[in-house]
Amino acid sequence: TRDIPSECKLLASLTRASDFQHHGYEEMVSALFAVQSECPYITRIYSIGHSVEGRHLYVLEFSDNPGIHEALEPEFKYIGNMHGNEVLGRELLIYLAQFLCEEYRAGNERITHLIHDTRIHILPSMNPDGYEVAARQGPEFNGYLVGRGNAKEVDLNRNFPDLNALMYYYEKHNGQNHHLPLPDNWELQVELETLAVIKWMQNYNFVLSANLHGGAVVANYPFDKSREPRIRGKTSNSATPDEKIFKKLAKTYSYGHSWMHKGWNCGDYFDEGITNGASWYSLSKGMQDFNYLHTNCFEITLELSCDKFPPATALASEWLANREALVSYMEQVHHGIKGMVYDENNNPISNAVISVAGINHDITSGTDGDYFRLLLPGTYTVTASALGYQPFTKTVTVGPAEAVQLDFYLKVQPKGTNLNVKAYPNKKGSPTAKSPPTNLGPR
């Protein structure tokens, strides 16, 4: 028999409209466990915590060694349904999980390669309580805000510690440019769902992420919070030091999507289907900026539908519109440089700082001594440094294909010499931001 072209195979799995239904909490959990039982050797289900009403925040992991971080294999995450009434992301992530399992079993080379070389974590619903409130209203009557917040009606995307104010202060005073410290007693200041996600981020060395929202159609990249004081009716671009790579990541999604890149959607125009968060509207205490400022992870926010709670009849076409973008975006985790940081005896060094000349945002090696630095093609000067060791600098040329491996071997600093490791002011005495009025746009 003739081989079926892979594109037809892709279409064959999950295209019957009857397969596409909204999933309440019980149905979502059943769907995740069904995938796990269908693909037991490449998946794992774990809970990162509970919602206010006691629902599990379940994550489905895909990897050729589930439950294990393999050195030099990057960690990726997708988060859906942070706003309970923005439901398309939740459904797309359930379909994505089913799709990855089915395609892996069918021998799809692209998906097999992705699962073997990446550790993928999918959290379909960060706000299962809010979803249930929104679902009780149903698609036809869903208000713009009903079910947006958690069970305490707190907007989870305005609930992360505000590290932007500290970052903008440090920029002016040559301070720390990564892994900013959290305020004292931060655990008591955030919701249970936010707490669970922050602990999750601290426990896994995520490299790339997206969080899926609704209410617009655009790929939104950091910073979300403006550096400038707010002037009514005026917004300004608030670029990260990694502006160029963030634009590339956002375009990967918008051009992979059937119509996002066209720009005109939901009565708004975004050139190429992407926007800097602050140039759209400024937002404080969001999850996207927190990823970049507290961890090694680069995250963008994907607005995926004009209708926050689309009818079930729209789900099949939405899946087809987003499927390629969801896969292409995951593949972006394999660009730039990665490598190991060792001492002279080949022992891995964790928490080594990796600095790229000209980009004022460092990243760190993980517990196994491996690091991952997303970069566009080009030639870079890269320095690895760690407390007690002499820094080492190398030049590397990055191409458009897979990440270039660049390992570092650090020599112990001779006693009594000045350590050339970046020293940063501590968090005491730095400014605290006054929270502006909360803006309730889609994000």
Image (cartoon, rainbow, N blue to C red):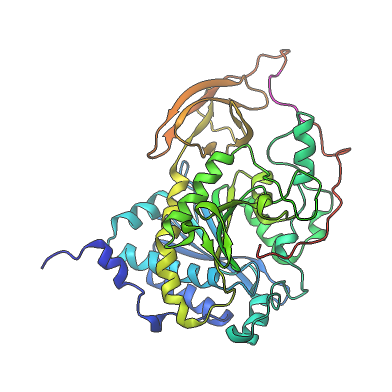
Q: Is residue 242 above or below residue 162?
A: above
- Residue 176, percent across and down? 73, 34
- Residue 230, percent across and down? 80, 50
Q: Quadrant of residue 404?
A: top left
Question: What residue appears at the point 27 percent right and 61 percent down from the top-left corner?
Answer: 107
Inspect the magenta stretch and tell me whether residue 420 lies in it. yes
Q: Is residue 270 above or below residue 410?
A: below
Direction right: furthest residue: 429
In the picture, which quadrant includes the C terminus? bottom right
Question: What residue appears at the point 42 percent right and 54 percent down from the top-left corner?
Answer: 328
Q: Is residue 279 left or right of residue 22?
A: right
Asked whether residue 280 is in view, the answer is yes
Q: Quadrant of residue 193?
A: bottom right
Choose between 161 and 439: the one closer to the eye.
Answer: 439
Q: Main secondary structure of the magenta part?
A: loop
Question: What residue appears at the point 71 percent right and 75 percent down from the top-left corner?
Answer: 145
Q: Is residue 79 left or right of residue 119?
A: right
Direction left: furthest residue: 1
Asked whether residue 80 is in view, the answer is no
Inspect the magenta stretch and tell me whether residue 315 lies in it. no
Q: Which residues are magenta?
A: 419-424
